[in-house]
Image (tube, rainbow, N blue to C red):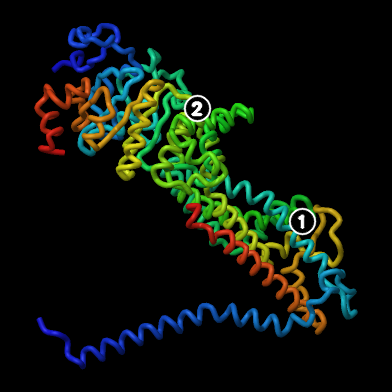
Amino acid sequence: MRFETAHQHTWRKIKSALACTIAFVSAILVISPLGLVFFYLLIHGAGSVNWDFFTKLPAPVGAVGGGMVNAIVGSLELLALAGLIGIPVGVLGGVYLAEYGSARINSVLRFLADVLNGVPSITWGMVVYGLVVLRFKGFSAYAGSLALALIMIPLILRTTEEVVLLVPNGYREAALALGVSRWKTIVHIVMKTASKGIITGILLALARVGGETAPLLFTAFGNRFWNHSLSQPIAALPLQIFTYAISPYDDWHRQAWAGALVLVTGVFCVNVIVRILTRGRAASVV
Amino acid sequence: MTTSERSVLECVEPPAELASAEEPVPACSFQVKNLSIWYGEKRAIDDMTLDIASNAVTAIIGPSGCGKSTFIRALNRMHELVPKTRVEGTVLLQGEDLYSSAVDPTIVRRRVGMVFQKSNPFPTMSIGENVIVGLRLNGVRDRKFLNERLEKSLRMSALWDEVKDDLHKPGTSLSGGQQQRLCIARALAVEPEVLLMDEPCSALDPIATAKIEELIYELKTKYTIVTVTHNMQQAGRISDYTAFFYLGRLIEFGPTTKIFTNPSERQTEDYITGRFG
């Protein structure tokens, strides 16, 4: 056996450096949109994020000023209501997939959940429009939350299933061997052990639907005033941004930028919370 | 060798060799009759009949894959967690059929506790919570009773003095040997009649192992203990009776001293002397 020549050695180093550079550039390309978006939003929106923005209702058409307080509160209401529907169904469904059911049924359910995850969000708006809005003859906060909940369910279901499957079998066996019933083992041992992961999945799903506009277009519809009943149309931050962005008024454009900045910051904060929650992951298994 | 000769501890009619011994014939805890267990198509246990004595340590030895764990898990119906298992034959616990359709496996497991090879204290719970979790999840709320049982169980598992000031710390903060004793305390807290141990020392160092062995020796005054072990010396040290399994069959069962000094089966002798396995 012979050692490589100096020439081969140099050529190998060049190839290595080339591969490294390509990977580095790709990585930059992946994260640069986030930086660009944030930078752009700051430039255009930061000036309009002020006290009025968080405390005032939208000004009448044509008038300057006003804020988006009704949209911010509306978004929170929609998320709360969507969570009320989507979290229990998603979490319990995920637990079913991980703990019960036969392998064949589970693989079908898993496949369906993945298909649902890929359905364009406007489709959910149309489905809820047909099922709820037409039947009850009106746009409402209920319809908007249902559309958001339908998007959340398959997301939460899959993340819950994955983290519940990560819980080592030894804990289930230990609890069952103590004469603890199956469901108590699942609730008090398995889900408790996986709780951080489950909460992470829920937060990420909330962050995802918090920015959804399309499913709200013909369900929640939007509202320039306070919503006084959940069976009435309700404002939401992404909807308000959409409406203002396509309007002809400069002041509205500025407020749309501000809204987008607030929304992105909110989603960013949720992700930071998730990071903090999952930091101790190694210590507590899941 | 016929099936009836294999069960050395026949409760009803003790065989002559035991009846003539100086000790009185011990009562038996489990009576296993013609037990066979299948995982799908694979037969893991093949027609086993043996009786397990009360307040004694019974060790099960044999090479890997001989059905030791399956057998011990059949004694509290833990093997049913594996899908597609099928059982034939009977297992009586104090005369009651474990596999009768009226029996809830959850209740069986309250009477027959289990300690596993890998110590597995619940990571979300403190040392104290780990011990009383079985009682709490079965609806015991009385704080005073729980505290008494907590101390009693930890004392029985020889862990009290080491952890009494750290009961609030996570169970996983203990050393490997302490964790295993915590798991024993957890199993004892629900006051079972029998303690099954599936290679309880195989992940521990010699010092921790010695402590667990000492503990087993003390616990047998109150409990029936069935333990699986890969370690022949350990079986010799701690057990009163030894069963040798090979390929899912019970090859030989009898007092440990006899199995280790004067086995009647050639295969037993070969295994114990290290010629195979």
Q: Amino acid at mark 1?
A: Ala
Label 1 sits on a secondary structure element that is helix
Query: Crowding at label 1, few (<14), some or many (≥20) Cα neighbours within 10 Å?
Result: many
Query: Crowding at label 2, few (<14), some or many (≥20) Cα neighbours within 10 Å?
Result: many
Name the residue nearer the viewer: B146 or A64: B146
Q: Quadrant of residue A14?
A: bottom left
The relative height of residue B142 versus residue A42 in the rendered view (above or below) is above
Q: Position of residue A173 (x, y in %)?
A: 43, 37
Q: Position of residue B114 (x, y in %)?
A: 40, 31
Q: Are marks 2 and 1 on the same chain?
A: no
Which residue is disc 1 drawn over?
A141
The relative height of residue B177 versus residue A236 in the rendered view (above or below) is above
Q: Position of residue B253 (x, y in %)?
A: 21, 22
Residue A80 appears left or right of B235: right
Residue under the image location 46 percent in, 37 percent down: B159
Q: Amino acid at mark 2?
A: Val
Name the outermost residue toward the bottom.
A7
Which residue is disc 2 drawn over?
B190
Residue under the image location 76 percent in, 73 percent down: A243
In this rendering, the count of numbered labels is 2
Q: Quadrant of the N terminus of chain B?
A: top left
Chain identity of mark 1: A
Q: Quadrant of residue A103?
A: top left
Residue A179 seen in the current view: no
